[in-house]
Image: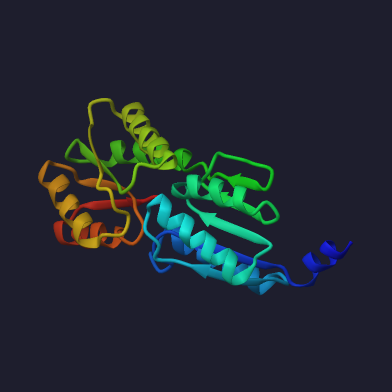
Amino acid sequence: MASMMCWRSKPVVAALFCGHVDDNGFMRAGYQGLQKAQTQLPIIAHYKDKVANETQAQITALRELVQQYKPNLLIAHGGQNTDAALTVAKEYPDILVALTQGAVTAENLSSYDVYQEESAWLAGAYAALMTKAGVVAHQSGIRVPPGLRARASFAAGVKHANPDVKLLTNFSGNQDDIALVERVTKAQAKSGADIIYTMLNKGRSGTTEACHELGIKEIGNV
């Protein structure tokens, strides 16, 4: 009864965003959801962003959130946090942990998976139908399972709509490096792509600017 009363009095929610909450993409969507929850629900929300997409850095950040805020619910936003979420959930069995874009569970760990591959298939089909050059491209940063599934679905959509369309694909290794993504975009355009599908965070603005400059099209996944 005491723990239930504590939960109902103002539960604390802490969230980790690997990347930047102002990326106009996946991280921002999660951050806006957290802010909306704090507005509409009787909770206290805290967050940490600008954390490297590296397991040990993620573990450290999640531990810091636990130690600083003692949350009832800890959120790890993004499938790249899978190993870190499993580790920290095991270390703190009394805290509920939620992983977005994940596919793992434990006694106190739940996963919420957005099926991005469904919209990715549609994006691929649309790109194949609309390309004038006969070449389309995919861009992403890190090779996490949701990104790999979405890339496969995009490719399947392209092939279904027009098997003669050539697909270029790239994982640059970084979701947030604007200059790197801009270089990738220009390289893909030089190879003939006139439509580029992006699965990036803050780095997406590099694609957007390059597409404006080159006069080609972009499809974003968020």
Outermost residue toward the left in this view:
190
User: Picture quarter containing residue 22?
Assistant: bottom left
Q: Is residue 11 left or right of residue 179?
A: right
User: Picture quarter containing residue 36?
Assistant: bottom right
| The C terminus: image quadrant | bottom left
Outermost residue toward the front in this view:
91
* Residue 94, image x, y percentages: 70, 55
Q: Residue at x 23, y 31 (%)?
A: 165
Q: Is residue 141 left or right of residue 51?
A: left
In the displayed structure, 39 sits above or below 94; it is below
Q: Residue at x 40, y 34 (%)?
A: 153
* Residue 89, image x, y percentages: 60, 50
Q: Residue at x 60, y 51 (%)?
A: 91
Query: In terms of depth relative to the viewer, which is nearer, 62 or 140?
Result: 62
| The N terminus: image quadrant | bottom right
Query: In terms of depth relative to the viewer, which is nearer, 7 or 87?
Result: 87
* Residue 82, image x, y percentages: 50, 45
Q: Is residue 5 left or right of residue 195?
A: right
Q: Report the number of discs.
A: 0
> Is any atom of residue 222 visible in this view?
no
> Is any atom of residue 70 visible in this view?
yes
Query: In terms of depth relative to the viewer, which is nearer, 40 or 61?
Result: 61
Q: Is residue 132 left or right of residue 198?
A: left
Q: Residue at x 26, y 47 (%)?
A: 196
Query: In terms of depth relative to the viewer, which is nearer, 165 or 197?
Result: 197
* Residue 108, image x, y percentages: 68, 48
In the displayed structure, 54 sits above or below 166; it is below
Outermost residue toward the right in this view:
1
In the displayed structure, 14 sits above or below 149; it is below
